[in-house]
Amino acid sequence: MKKLPLLILAILALGALSALAAGRQRQAGTETEDTRKADYIYLEALRAKSQSNHDAAFALLQRAHELNPADREIGVELSTYLLSLSQTDSALLTSSMALLRDYCEANPTDIYYGGRYAMLNEQLLNRDEALRTWKRLHTLYPDRLEVTYRYAGALAQGGTQADRDKAIAVYDSVEIAEGKSIPLSSKKIQLYYSLQDTASILAEADRLRNSAPRNVDFQVFSGDIYSMFGLNDQAKQFYDSACILDPSSGLAYYSRAQFYHTLGDSAAFNREVFQALEQKNLNVETKLVILRSYIQEMFNDSTNFPQIGQLFDVLIDQHPHEHDIHDLYSRYLIVTKDYSKAAEQTERALDLDPADSEGWEMLTSLYLQVDRLDDARQAIKRSLRYYPDNSRQYLVLGSIYDQEGQRDKATAEYRHALSLTDSTDVSQLSRIYGAMGDNLYASEQADSAFVYYQKSLLYDPDNTLALNNCAYYLACEGRDLDRALEMIEKAVGAEPENATSMDTYAWVLFKRKDYAKAREIIDRTLSLTDERSEEILEHAGDIYFMDGDPDGALRFWKEALELAPDNQLLAKKVKHKTYFFK
C-alpha cells in the first residue's frame, strides 16, 4: 500500500476506530447468501486491519463491497483505503468520497466520519458541501466547540456577507456560553479585517477589554489592535494600564517596549526593556524571554552590543546565582566572538550547575579557541568527574596532548575514547580514527597513518577533516595524488569557504604540477581569511614561484618569515630568492 499524505492521515485518524465500535444492525428478512458472505468477509477485513495487514484488508473490503454494495459500513471502511490510493487517480477519489457521503447521510449523528467528510471537502475546496455538513453537525452537537469553530470558519471562508454575519453570530453564541476571550475576538477581528471594517475591529477590542477591565492580556491586546491602526495615544494608554495593573507582567512591559520600537523610538525601547528587567517581582524566566527577544531585535547592529552587555550586568547583579542567565550570556558572547569572557560566564554557570554536560564541552572548546590548553585540559578532567563515559571529551583531551607533542598520552586518550564509543556512533568513531591518523603521521608513521585515515573514512566517508588531512599528507609524501585530489575536491565541495581545505586543494594541485590552477586556488584561499598563517603564505610563495612569478613568491615568503623567523627553509628561500624542496 502507498503511504498516506500527511494531511489525509490526520483526517483519517478522526474516525479510525468508529467502525470497530459500531454495532452492525440489519432489518429482519433482508439477509441473503451474499450479505452473509459480505458480513463474514468484512469481519475478516477488520481483523486484517487490526493486524496492520492493509493489503489483505483492502482486498477483503473490495470483495465484501462487491457482494453487498448497499452496506454503508463496508463502504465507509473501503473509502478509507480508496482515499489512500487516490493521490494520482481522481476516479478513486470520487469513489471514496461517494462512499463516505452515503455513510454520512445514513448516519448523520456520527461526528467522527461526519467531521472527516467535512474536512476532506474543505481540502478539496468543496465549500458548499463542507458548510452543509458542518451546519448539520453543529445543529446536532451545539455544545461541541471544535464543531462550532469549524462551522463558523466554513461560513467565513469565501462566503457572502450574510454568511460572514452568521459566522459572527456563531462566535457570539460561543461567547455567551464560554465568555469573552482573545482567540474568539481574534476570529471576529479577522472577519472584520477582510471587510475592511475598522470601526468594528476597534469596537470588538473595546468589548473584550471592557468585559474584564483588570485583565492585563486584554489591555495589551487592545494596545496591539489600536497600534496596528496608528492610534498610538490610545495604544500607549492601554499598555500603561497593563503595566500598572500587573507590574510583574513581562508581556505588558515588553509589549510596551515593542510599541516604542515600532515607532522608531530606540531610546524609549531601550528604557522600557531596562525597566522591565529591573523589576524585582518579575520572575527570571520571563526576564530571559524578554532579553532573548531584545537580543534578536538589536543584534544586527553592533553599536547595540554595549546596551546588551549592560542588560546582562543588570540581571546578574539581581540574580547572581541563576545558571540560565550566565549560560545565555556565554552563548551571546560566543556569537560576538568574545571567547575569553564567554569562558568566564560558562565557568560561573557550571559552578552553579556542574551537571551540564553540554556546558563542559562548550567550556573546553572556548579555552581551546583562545589557546589556553592547560585550562581546557583541566576543564575536561573536571567534567569527567560528572560524565566519566563521555568519549568526546577523551577525544579532545587526546588532541590537546597531540598539540603539545605528547604522542603516547594522546594515543592512550584516543584508545579510551574508542572503548567508550558505541559501535553505532559512526561519526564519533570516524573522528577518533581520524585523530589517530594525525597522531601517527606526526609520529613519522605515515603508512600506519593512512591505514587509520581509511578506517575513519570507512565509518564516515563525508568526514571533511579526515578527507583534508589524508589528502594533504598524501601530497606531502608525493604519493597517490589522484586519490588525494579526489578526497580534497570532496572536502572542498562540502565546505567551499573553508580556508584550510582550500589551502590543501592548492597544495595537491601544486604537487600535481598544475601550477596555474594551484595559483587560482591559493588566491581564493587568501581571500577567505584575514588571519594569514605561515603555512598558507609559504605555500603561496612556492606556487607563485613555480607559476613563473618569483617577485610575488618572494613577497609571500618574506611575510611568512616574519611570522616564523626560526623557519630555516623559509629563510633560505628568501635569501636566495628561489624555491627549495627541502
Image (cartoon, helix red, strand yellow):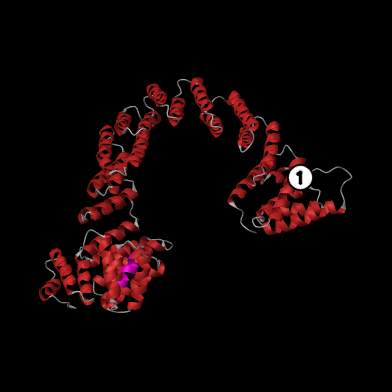
The magenta segment: 465-474
Dot 1: element: helix
Left or right, 116 with respect to 377, comes to right
Relative image position of residue 187 (x, y in whole percent): 55, 32
Examine the rendered structure and indicate whether residue 277 appears above or below residue 71.
above
Give yes or no for residue 379 being in the magenta stretch. Answer: no
Q: Is residue 107 visible?
A: yes
- Which residue is at 25% across, 41% downward? 303
Give yes or no for residue 470 being in the magenta stretch. Answer: yes
Q: Nearer the viewer, residue 470 or 132?
A: 132
State which quadrant residue 52 falls in.
bottom right
Relative image position of residue 495 (x, y in whole percent): 35, 62
Kind of residue at badge 1: Asp
Relative image position of residue 193 (x, y in whole percent): 53, 32
Q: Residue furthest left?
A: 575
State which quadrant residue 571 falls in.
bottom left
